[in-house]
Amino acid sequence: MKKIHSFARFAATSLALGLTLAGHSSVFAQAIFPIDRAAILAGSKFDFKVEFDRVVDAAKTRISINGIDAAKVLGAEPQFIFNEDGKKVSSFVLPGVMLDKPGSYDVVAVSGNARMQVTWEVYATGPRKAKNVILFIGDGMTVANRTAARILSKGIKEGKYLGRLSFDDMSNMALVGTSGVDSIITDSANSMSAYTTGHKTSVNALGVYVSRAKDNLAHPKVETITELIKRKTNMAVGIVSDAEVEDATPAGMVAHTRRRADKDIIAEQLFFSRADVIMGGGSAYFLPQTTPGSKRKDTNNLIDLFKLDDYAFASTDKEMKQAAANPKTRKLLGLFHPENMDGALDRHFLKKGTVPQFPEQPDLADMTRTAIEVLSRNPNGFVLMVEAGLIDKFNHPLDWERSVYDTIMLSNAVQVAKDFAAKNNDTFIMVTPDHTHGASIVGTIDDNKPGTEMRNKVGVYADAGYPNYPKANKDGYPEKVDVSKRLAFFYGNTPDYYETFQPKMNDPFVPAIKLTKDGPYVANPAYKDVPGAVLRTGILPQSADTGTHTADDGVLSAMGPGSERIHGFMDNTEIFRAMADSLGLAANANSTKMVKASKVVKPVTAAK
């Protein structure tokens, strides 16, 4: 970016109304980032960018904040891009700026007869309430996942459950809206970025607003919770997932890129994040390209870099527990699989998937226990994110049994956190999906009903009765999933596929495939001859090979100091705000003192 001009001062009251140039034709939209109605934590960093839809004269451009030159308000030198990416459009950028004073900010940009305006809310926090924050993400966890996990794990009789999941009895609950800037349907990158930055973004984006920049790494950045914690406190940060650690949800804790697929870059950003504990799958992006199975495009060995930076390293469950048992371990990198780890049903019972190749993968509950053990050695507290990523990975291919066993595993992991929190009552715990799937329980399937048509074995209303899963073992899992009377759990938004009405006892379900390289996805014929299988014509475009996310609200459960903010309906950006408030990340000078959780948060005052 070539710096040419400073912003000229301009009085906002002299600006003409209107958002676009009258009579001007352009394929480029104009925009201000952060976007309109952005809520910004006081003192958090962001890149301020103004994009015009044409080449403009910097000397004749006026950008103001509450009527004052933006450069003066933000205290930074602006950069003017005359021809952005070689196109006939101009932009202004002020990277890494912040606003310290809470209130409403009107941002106006004018060049010629082009005018843009957005309004931001900058908010403070109350004093610190929580020593620790633990955010659990049940990736893609629908209400049906929770219900099915409760039935299989706890049992139900005469309409009453015989127990509850660990997050069922938390004190606070809210519905969470997950839509992003560009679509009502989010992906995990978009949604997790809202949780970890407090800013909305678009599908596939992490820690950035999506601008017109060609370079994935040149979009306007917003500060993540990890960066805030490391810049403003002495707390520790942990990131745990049973998916790849570079996958969208764990990446959301640290990453800044337009494309979540930049996994080799995200692995590097994990290193530079200084997160104290990082555990999950995805080792292929840490190993040099000379190593078989590597997915890097260079010879960098990131595992060696972590070791040089005093991280303990573990590649198996045993090594992880040994590292945690060492009281000197303060930083830990655990990579247990080159890709996504295997789910609970395969690891504990079926021994399918890649379990034979990687038999020593730890359980999510054990990774959570290890992370807490290491992070809690920091006397200043910690922020930990734990993702049950495989709930989503199995909901996509309509493999509900595997997704429900992983929901039970999430419940076990949350119980570990609750047990830790019970000792001091100083830990704020939240459990939430990042988005949902179109799934519901409609009844039961009874193999003992007469006939060969499986659909006629589906019982609804009184005919459903109850399934006959065996009582769960000590870890909460029924040891047999292919019972004779089981849940009728179906997905509504699917590609064409063969519904078999049965658990997939071999490998995870593959509902649709391409028969030719450029052809559409069709129902996978491998399941065509399963007795009773029914072809279900999908409702999704034939470019879809699996089920997709939905815009349905997610259900958030919470407990501990800070949970009083969790109620009613919440936008996903408010999850970040709840974490920031519980930790007093934008409090006044005496905010580091701990206060009782019941203390009401002070309202912010308007900027003057």
Image: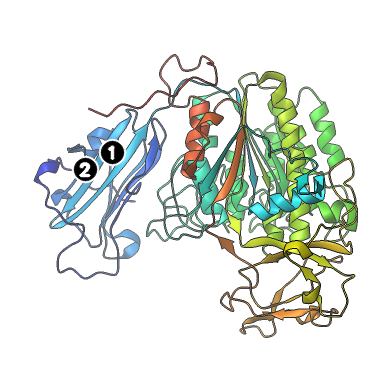
| Observer-nearest of 301 and 130 | 130
Name the residue beneath numbered marker 1.
77
Compared across the picture, whether 403 is left or right of 183 comes to: right
Quick check: 66 above or below 20? above
Residue type, numbered disc 2 = Ser
Question: Which residue has dot 2 on it?
Answer: 6
Viewer-proximal residue, 113 or 35?
Answer: 35
Q: Quadrant of the C terminus?
A: top left
Task: Using the rendered view, name the quadrant where residue 65 is placed.
Answer: top left
Residue 535 drawn at (x, y percent): 72, 81
Residue 179, image x, y percentages: 47, 54
The disc, 2 or 1, on the residue closer to the chain's N-terminal end is: 2
- Can residue 584 be spotted in the picture? yes
Camera-side residue of 77 and 282: 282
Query: x%, y% of residue 376?
Result: 69, 24
Determine whether label 2 and label 1 are within 8 Å by CB. yes
Q: In which image quadrant can residue 119 be found? A: top left
What amino acid type should be assigned to the residue bearing mark 1?
Answer: Glu
Q: Is residue 38 above or below residue 592?
A: below
The residue at the point 62 percent across, 82 percent down is 520
Please say if 546 is above or below 255: below
